[in-house]
Amino acid sequence: MGGMEELPDYAERVLEVAELIPPGRVMTYGDVAEWLGEGGPRQVGRVMALYGAAVPWWRVVRSDGVLLPGHELSALAEYRSEGTPLREAPRGAEGHLPRLDMKRARWDGEGSHI
């Protein structure tokens, strides 16, 4: 993990939470901020944009379940291999991209200990 030491403290904590999310589950940017008790969805989104490649970034998502713009297909491949609950796009929907089924996919941190 070369170069992790210059990560801002907050970023490091956000990434730690991202690593705790089990395969097949997701947390929203706001969930992560709430869990940490500091920052907000924007700060979490910014950390994920800058440093998220080091962790399972596809498990930290928008609260509406829309896949990360520009990364939809790589995220989708991860969701399919992890069995993350998806809502398939209605026929004729633009781009035919599913969304996350947030009711079923969202993880509340149960069973983990930080």
Image (tube, helix red, strand yellow):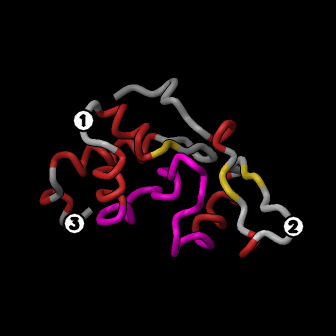
Mark 3 / mark 2, whichever is N-terminal: 3
Q: Amino acid at mark 2?
A: Arg
Dividing the image into 4 quarters, which one contains the N terminus?
Answer: bottom left
Kindly state the secondary structure of the residue where label 2 is placed: loop
Residue beneath label 3, please? Answer: 2
> What type is the residue that disc 3 sits on?
Gly
Disc 2: which residue: 91
Q: Along the horizontal axis of the image, is 8 left or right of 86?
A: left
Q: Do callouts 3 and 1 mark residues in contact (Cβ within 8 Å)? A: no
Crowd class of label 3 (few under 14; some 14 to 19; many from 20; radius 10 Å): few
| Mark 2 and mark 1: Cα distance apart in space | 41 Å
Q: Is residue 113 magenta?
A: no
User: What is the span of residues highlighted in magenta in the rendered image?
Assistant: 49-74
From what the image shows, is residue 34 above or below residue 15? above
Indicate the position of residue 25 as horizontal and vertical percent values. Answer: 59, 43
* Of the two numbered discs 3 and 2 in the rendering, the one whose residue sits closer to the viewer: 2
Q: Quadrant of residue 49?
A: bottom left
Q: Tell me the element at label 3.
A: loop
Name the N-terminal-most of marks 2 and 1: 1
- Residue 40, above or below 75: above
Residue 50: which quarter of the image?
A: bottom left
Mark 1 is on which residue type? Answer: Glu
Separation of residues labelled 3 and 2 (CA atoms): 46 Å
> On the image, numbered disc 1 is attached to which residue?
38
Q: Position of residue 77 (x, y in %)?
A: 66, 67
Local crowd at mark 1 within 10 Å, few (<14), some, or many (≥20)?
few
Instruction: Identify the element where label 1 is drawn.
Output: loop
Is 112 left or right of 12, judged from the image as shown?
right
- Of the two numbered discs 3 and 1 on the same chain, state the one appearing first in sequence: 3
